[in-house]
Image (spheres, rainbow, N blue to C red):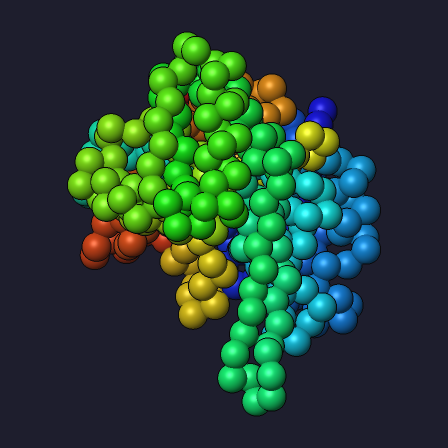
Amino acid sequence: MPKVTVIPGDGIGPEVVGAAREVIDAAGAGIRWDEQIAGQHAYEKTGNPLPDATLASIHRNQVVLKGPLTTHVGAGFRSINVALRREFDLYANVRPTLAFEGVKCLFPTLDLIVIRENTEGLYSSMEHWIGPGHQAAMGIGINTWTGMERICRFAFDYATKEGRRRVVAVHKANILKIFSGLFLEVAREVARGYPHIEFEDRIVDAMAMQMVRDPGRFDVVVTTNLFGDILSDLAAGLIGGLGLAPGANYGDEAAMFEAVHGSAPDIAGQGKANPTSLILAGVMMLDYLGLRAEADRIRRAVRAVLREGKAVTRDLKPGSTAGTREMTEAVIEKIVTF
């Protein structure tokens, strides 16, 4: 039985992580959970937002299911999520964007994957003030050939494995001719090794406009860190919001699966949180662990609950009185019938 580090997180994190664990257990996955802490809760308990025990657990298990985290202001990490990605070199962020029958959205047939480079670019945390009085600021981004090559190769391998037909590389090489141009050059070179995959490139501002107008023309999107952060949230908005958007972070030795929404402290503990994003992140985790049958059972159950719309949270159906508990139980009930 696989052992997984689970981090409940902050705010609504314990509620949605608890829901995902119940659903995964109901599907018969046989996961052994190794619960650890991070974020604001960890800081308040230990004085460290990312305790050594949590890092040690991830190093042992190499698979993480993580709830949303609140980064403590003034603590040692600008972002705990970024710190985790760097610690375990989780260089590929995968964000599926799949429309669900029964959920009102702009593009009800959309099925799109955004793959984001996760460790380089303008999130390299090299920034500082210039001169007195904080009147100017400088940020430095770094893209390496190695980093760009491995994310592009990951995207083409992912497309091949999942039976996808097209990959589009998104850049700003018309202006950032060296910084973004390196990514485009590498993407074009990697693409030549995958003749069975259609390849094109798009400038990021044009890509944002085209995604809003006609996202169905795209299949797999690969891009750098900052652009991927923005475009993946844009994509989630096209299918009903972040509550339906799971995320996975892959490295060569470890993987972390998470909801991509925030900790929503304003509704924490009220039983209102939509658990779908974390449940679907758990599905991606089961796929990664080779538990495809269990993952498929949960997929079918989630689709059925969303399609029926009887036990979904208010963000998915205005006026609904169902909460986290009711939606979780509905998904588990469907799993039992499959």
The residue furthest bottom is 133
The C terminus lies in which quarter of the figure?
A: top left
**Image position of 336 with respect to 211: above or below:** above
The N terminus lies in which quarter of the figure?
A: top right
Q: Nearer the viewer, residue 301 or 158?
A: 158
**Image position of 144 with respect to 51: above or below:** above
Q: Nearer the viewer, residue 295 or 178?
A: 178
Residue at (40% x, 15% y) in the render: 197
- Residue 84 in the figure: left or right of residue 257: right
Residue at (26% x, 40% y) in the render: 211
Residue 260 percent across, percent down from the top left: 47, 49
Q: Nearer the viewer, residue 108 or 186?
A: 186
Residue 157 percent across, percent down from the top left: 52, 20
Residue 22 percent across, percent down from the top left: 54, 39
Is residue 85 at least partly visible in the picture?
yes
- Residue 81 in the figure: left or right of residue 325: right
Residue at (29% x, 54% y) in the render: 315
Residue at (65% x, 27% y) in the render: 30
Is residue 24 at least partly visible in the picture?
no
Q: Nearer the viewer, residue 36 or 122?
A: 122
**Image position of 92 with respect to 209: above or below:** above
- Residue 258 in the figure: left or right of residue 37: left
Residue 172 percent across, percent down from the top left: 40, 46
- Residue 218 in the figure: left or right of residue 32: left
Please tell me how many numbered marks the rendered image carries: 0
